[in-house]
Amino acid sequence: MSEAGRVCPLRYRYGAAALATAPERVAETLYVVGGLYGNTAALDTLLAMVSAEPGPVTVCFNGDFNWFNVDDAGFDQINTAVARHDAILGNVEAELQPEADDAGCGCAYPDTVDAAVVARSNLIHAHLKATAARHPAHLAHLATLPMFARYRVGALRIGVVHGDANALAGWDFDVARLDDAFHRSALTQQFHTAEVDVFASSHTCLPVCLQLADGKILINNGAAGMPNFRGTQHGIITRISRHQGPHPALYSVNAGAYRIEALTLQYDPAAWQTEFVANWPPGSPAYQSYVDRILHGPAFTLAQAAP
């Protein structure tokens, strides 16, 4: 399938072996923030959480930090903040460059996603791309971002990706695929090829944390800037550290002395909903696709995400 919004461009494909040779960044505590989606209220909460930590924190925005922020002020606020921290590309950012090929939103949606949803995502991205064109300095910074990053927290080796071990918009770390034993076995090999103990991802927009038979850990934070469970109005981020943090975990898994946690990102939902509707009023593509999730959360539960 090659139509816009479903294709995974060849330039998105790097292969798990590329992570094994990526420059290694050292962190005491690592926050992985995927899918901020232009939510400025969530950004404010995130920065407050970082400030509350007792020790140094490295923040990596692992893509799709832009999406709903089609207003100039919101686009500038998100990208100015991200530029002060580590970041990698998401498909949203990868397709903002003027010369980007016609992959639409670049989401590489699987067949299970309705064609109308894909079409609306392409319209959302086109609007965002028009905004980005008015911010050449931010576009220039985005053009420098890698597609993956490698970290070390103590002895723990971490691969931070947007999609999966092989591609920027890959869906191998989707919770819907992880019940399959054959798929999990294939994932184990990807950890060894990448020479990592943990993969931290987002992209699929639903969270999951899984410890494989050999102790390798996959954690997908779902979305930092949108609800992840029905009946909730908060995002999720990933925290990796050997130090106890000040924020309670939704769920976690240990790797020796290290803790990999999913933290609640409790932004101000009323402020965010007001900002969202100002940019995307009723009848707009984003309103049609996302308002139910923003107000009520997706049809997904904490039990489905937790290890």
Image: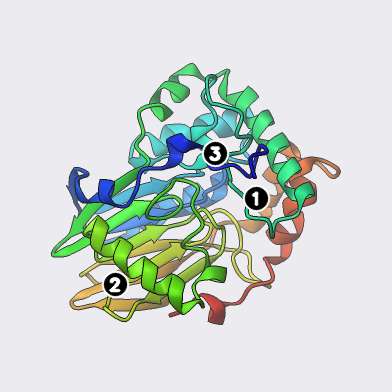
Determine which residue is flagged by label 3.
92
Q: Residue furthest right?
A: 283
Q: Which mark is residue 271?
A: 1
Kind of residue indicated by mark 1 = Ala
Disc 2 to disc 3, C-alpha distance: 28 Å
Of the numbered discs 2 and 3, the one sitting upstream in the chain is 3
- Whether residue 235 is visible: yes
On screen, residue 235 above or below 17: below
Q: CA distance from mark 2 to mark 1?
A: 39 Å
x and y percent of residue 230 in the render?
A: 67, 72
Please rate how many residues cluster around mark 1, counting C-alpha atoms within 10 Å: few if below 14, some from 14 to 19, many from 20. few
Q: Residues within 10 Å of mark 2 (few under 14, many from 20)?
A: some
Q: Which residue is mark 2?
A: 216
Quadrant housing the C terminus: bottom left
Residue 2, quarter of the rendered image? top right
Q: Which amino acid, by three-letter code, is at mark 2?
A: Lys
Q: Residues within 10 Å of mark 3 (few under 14, many from 20)?
A: many
Above or below, 249 relative to 99:
below
* Alpha carbon separation for disc pair 3 and 1: 24 Å
Q: Where the N terminus falls, by quadrant?
A: top right
In the image, farthest residue toward the left: 155
Q: Is residue 198 above or below residue 144?
A: below
Tell me if I can see residue 249 in this picture. no
Considering the numbered disc 1 on the image, is that residue within a helix, a strand or a loop?
helix
Q: Secondary structure at mark 3?
A: helix
State the residue at coordinates (78%, 42%): 285
The colour style of the image is rainbow
